[in-house]
Every structure is written in C-alpha cells, then in structure tokens.
Image (cartoon, rainbow, N blue to C red):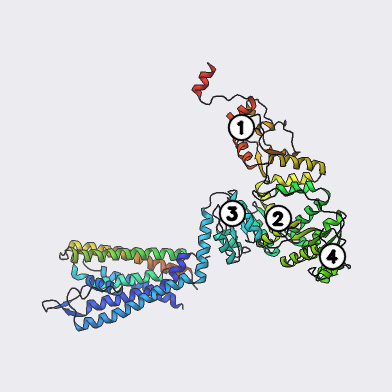
Amino acid sequence: MNLEKVIFAFFSILALTLNYGFFIGELDDPTHHNVYELFAALTVSLIATIMKFGDRAHIGALLLATSLVADLQLIAAALVWGYVVYVAESPLEPSVMSSIVSLSGGALLANLTSVILLVVETVTFRR
Amino acid sequence: MHNVISLLLRRMRLPLIVLITTYAVSVLGLTLIPGVDDQGNPWRMDFFHATYFVSFLGSTIGFGEIPYPFTGAQRMWTTFTIYAAVVSWLYAIGTILTVIQDQGFRRVLAFSSFSRKVRRMQEPFYIVCGYGDASRLLVRELSERCIHCVVVEKDREKILDLAVEDLPDFVPGLSEDATNSDTLIAAGLKRPNCRGVIALTGDDHSNLTIAITSKLLAPDIQVICQSDSKDSAANMASFGTDHIIDPFEIFASRFAMMFHSPSMYLVYEWMTAVYGAPLSDFKRPPTGSWVLCGFGRFGKAVREYIAIEGVKTRLIEAEPEATGAPLDTVEGRGTEANTLLDAGIQDAVGVIAGTDNDANNLSILITARYLNPGLFTVVRQNQQKKAPIFKAADIGLIMQPGTLVAQNILGLILSPLLGDFFRLTRDQNEEWANVLVSRIAGVVAEVTPETWELEISVLQAPAVYNRQRCGHKVQLKDICSNPKDRSKLLPCVPLLIKRDGMDMLLPDMEEHLQNGDRILLCGRQDASSRLRYTINDHQALDYIQTGIDHPRGTVWRWITSA
C-alpha cells in the first residue's frame, strides 16, 4: 500500500463528496445549501490541487487540469455569494442561489472527471 | 533533465498544503466562535469577514478588530491564528529560498535556460566542447567573424570566464560534462542548424567520446577533434571524424618545412594566422646539431620530422626510460648548465625547449643562451596567459599548441578549400612559394591576409550567372577588378579554382569562369566585400567588363537610347 496514493485518493474523493453535499437539494432554496459545506468543498479542492502538483505524467497533467477547473468554479460560486450579500447587500434571492449552486454543479462535474481519471489510472497501472 | 517548474511545484507541495490548512482552520474558527455586535446582540462572523480578517492578519498587516470589537473567546482564537499563520508563512518562504539556493536546482535552472537559448538560435552554429586556451581563441575568432557558437565546459570557473569575456557575439555557455549525450543534445547537436562539433576538452578520451556520440546521433554534421597521440587519432579516424588536429604533429611538420623551404612555411603561417595579426618575418633555422629538451609527445614529433631534413638532435630528458628515449640521451631537465653542456650546447646551432612546463622551458632558454649566445631558439609555450613573458624573451620560434589548434580549426571552418590548397602546395618548390609570398606581401600591407571562398552559382554570384547567360564570358580578372575603378585590381590573390574535381593552383587571371566553380582567394579584408559586391551587382560587373556605366532606371535608359 502506498501512503501517498491513499492520501491523494482521499482528498480527491473528499472534494467530490463535499461538492456533491453542497450541490444536492432544491436548486434555488437557500436553506438546502449550507455555506460551511461550500467552504469545506473549496478548501479540500484547493488541497487536492496542490497534491497534484509536480506530476509530469500525462494523466497527472489531466488530473491537475480538472482540479483547477473545480477550484475556479467553486471560487466563482463563493465570490458570487460574497458579492451579493456583502457588496450589493441584498438578500439571497432564489435566482442568485440557483446561479451559485449551478456553478458548484460545474465543479462537481470536474471533480467527477478527476475521480474517474483516478480510477482509470489505478486500473491501468496495477502495482 | 527535469522541468524547472514541475520541480519547484513538487518541492512546494507540503508548504502550500500547510498554508491552506492553517487559513481554512482559522477562518472556520472565526465563523464558529460566538461574538456580540455593537448593540450587544449575539452575532457570528460570516465567511466573507472571516476571510478578510485572516488575510490581513496572516500577512501581519493588522487593521484591528472588525466589524465589531471581539469577545474574549474570539481574541483567544485570533492569538492562535497569528502564530499559526506566521509560522506557516515562514515555512513556505523558507522552502522557496532553500529550493532556489539548492545547487541541484540551480544546475537544472542553468541547464534549461541554456537549452532554451540554443533552441532560439536560428542561424547556423558550432558546438565547442571545452573552454581551454585553444577554444577561447577559437570562440573569439568565430564570434568576430559573426559565426555563432555555444560552449560546453566541465569546469564552472571557465564558464564564468566566458560570461565576462567581451565577445562581439552572444555565446551561451553551460558547465556540464560534454561527454554526456544529454548535454550535447541540449547544446543543439540534433538541431538542423548545427554545423559541427569541435572537441577540445584537453583530454583525448573525452574528445573521442564526444566524437563517437556526435557521429552516432547526428551523422551528417562535421566533427573536428583535437588529439595528442597517434593512437587516439587513428581511433577517431576509424569512425569518420572529419578532421583530427594534432598540434604537435602540425608544428613539427611546419618546423621541418622551415629548414628546406622557409617561404613555404610563411605561406602556411600567413594563411592560418589569426584575425589581424602582424605579418611574420622570413626565418631560416640553421642546419647542424640541435639540442632538444623534453622527449614527450612534442619532442618525439619534432625529432622525427627534423631527422628527415637531416638535422641531428641531442636529447635531454628527465625520465629517459619512461619516455623511451634513445641511449645517448642526457638525463636531466635541461634547466641546469651542466646537462646542457653535456648535450653539447656549445657546438650546437639551436635549442628546442619542449617540456610541458613553461617555467622550465624559459629557464632552459635563458641558460642555453648564456652558454651559447648565437643559438636559434624554439620554445614550447603551454599556457596562453604566459604570452607576454614569452614575447619579452625574444625567442626565434614559439610553439603555442592552443593557437595552432584554433588557427587550423578556423581555417577548416572558414575555407574548406584551404585544405586542398595546402595539399597541392606540397608538390611545389621553394621558388614557387617565393613568388607567392611576394605576391601576397604586395597586396596586404602590414597584417596577415584574410582567406575566403566564393562559389560561382545563381545564388552566390547572380551577376556572373546573368552575364554568362547573355553569352558573355567572365574572366577571373573581371571579378577581381575594383568596381569603382576598373583599371585597378583589388588587393587579393586567387589561390585555387576547383572545377568538377579538377584543381587549378594559382589560376591565370585570364581564366574563364564557369558555373559551379569554387574559388579560394586571399588578400585584404576590404577586397572580400568589394568582390562580393561585383559578383552580386550586374551593373558593377557590366561596368568592369565594358567600361560603360549604364543607366539604372528604365526612363533614363530610354532617354539615352533615343
């Protein structure tokens, strides 16, 4: 068992599950989407990205790319949330909430791709 | 070699994870700890403000407690945050600094920046392996003639010398072992604009390895090697090394030439001289008994060659058995008066100081001259930087291996026909050489002549081609005339015309040029550019042949013809 692979897979999958947890629920209902879950998803996604740094294999580059996409989507979601609430100082309208959640849905797809790639890699190079 | 960025990222993985975790825990803590607002109502910090607070706290800017004054619990958590953030920042910055200062990382950095510079080179270039005396001179001469090169040298100090050398052209240098094939590839061995590899590492075995690597990886490029022994020279020749330069062999054959045809020696000396060197004088060493100090590679070559000229040598050698010196060799270094006297210095006509130690060679010279002031002196100078001392010693003939090697390689690169020319001159006699020397001395004033090559072809000589196509004959005399005044010839001497495998040594000025001719000329540098002008500009050639300066424009031509 390779400890590096375990930690790597742990963070990749945790990023996916947390992202899913935030995404699930009524699209425009603010009570279904917890801000702490978004925070956790973003943090774990950032850590997962850094774990993928420096891998020069082709699949490693692909993993890094998907992770960067997920980060970008989640940061965009957090920025929209922060802007609406603290800069525009308006309540969380259903329209705003749905755009935040759909951004995180994009991140979910990226994270899913990342996990699929991880599974593909594991199946291909059995050691 | 590793990619620099990926190496840096891999080393930064842990510090960045620590940093993100610290920030995440701090932000989370601030949002969870209850506080009170300015009205005294319970209040919790939101993510936006928590992130803002931790960001300015972590970078030790510190704007104070916002948006409301903190409670005790919040202050306690903030204290923890301050220390955690500072420590993780120190760790991250420290790691970056360590990576940048790391010798291994710097090597990778130097390597990748060198190969990037080589990749960006668009024009033809040569790879010079080793940066000793010979290479230093060669690189300078090449860059003065706008021929690009890159240098690979094992010794870091020497590469630093290259960086501070004031060269007219930018020459990238890398301190790596050139016998490594990766290094040669990074230096551009496989690039289409790489013209050749020049191996001058000062070690026969390394030169051999470089030659093999180059010939296997890039069979079409020219490989020039220095070799100090016949064994390795034969080995290099066996797998197709294009040119093998043995400075001792070259010197010995030239020195022997001085005995029977000093003018021929001058021809060789001038043709291969460095850029703008003063013309050397006519010298003739006396035939008689000579004293030779040092029976190494140099001594052996010299003794062998001058024996053919009928010159007897008495040897002085410190280790006669180890070097395989003949039985009548005097044992000693030659720096003491008694060994020189034993070797018969007082009856000798000349002395050759040929050990591999410059101080000893100078000492031999001074002692020998004291014992017999009329001697013809030949001294081997091993290190280029001692040139001022050797110059001051007023020596008959100085042998500098580095200069000899650089000059010969330069000749091969600049004018490949020079080799053919030298081969043909071997069949000529001293009178022929005498005439040539006086002709060359007539056109060049003070400095050694420049040699260059021309090809009569559509691309290189469009004017000549055009003229020939119109049915006119172009003579050698025509292109050698001054395009400003056709009654005068340019200060140059045509040495050789090569046509369909036929060689014409010192061709006649009336010779008709043909398409495909390759011409070797020597003369003053300005003649070279004037001559190129003539063969490119049909108006100039037209003027030289007819004496009429035809108008250039269509309108004016129409007016004059009407």
Q: Position of residue B219 (x, y in %)?
A: 65, 53
Alpha carbon distance from label 4 to label 1: 58 Å
- Using the image as rendered, state which of residue B363 and residue B140 is in the foreground: B363
Alpha carbon distance from label 1 to label 3: 34 Å
Q: Hey, which quadrant is residue B436 in on the image?
A: top right
In the figure, is residue B156 to the left or right of B515? left
In the figure, is residue B233 to the left or right of B52? right
Judge if badges 3 and 4 mark residues of a common chain. Answer: yes
Q: Looking at the rendered structure, which numbered label has been put on residue B149?
A: 3
Secondary structure of the residue carrying tag 1 is loop
Q: Chain of mark 2?
A: B
Alpha carbon distance from label 1 to label 2: 36 Å
Alpha carbon distance from label 4 to label 2: 24 Å
- Please name the residue that numbered disc 1 is placed on: B483
* Mark 2 residue type: Leu
- Please name the residue that numbered disc 4 is placed on: B315
Q: Position of residue A57 (x, y in %)?
A: 47, 65
* Mark 1 residue type: Pro
| Dot 3 crowding, Cα within 10 Å, few <14, some 14–19, many 20+ | many
- Please name the residue that numbered disc 2 is placed on: B404
Residue at x 18% of width, y 81% of height? B71
Sequence order check: which comes first, mark 2 or mark 3? Answer: 3
Q: Are marks 4 and 2 in contact (CB under 8 Å)?
A: no
Alpha carbon distance from label 2 to label 3: 19 Å
Sequence order check: which comes first, mark 4 or mark 1? Answer: 4
Sequence order check: which comes first, mark 1 or mark 2? Answer: 2
In the figure, is residue B520 to the left or right of B177? right
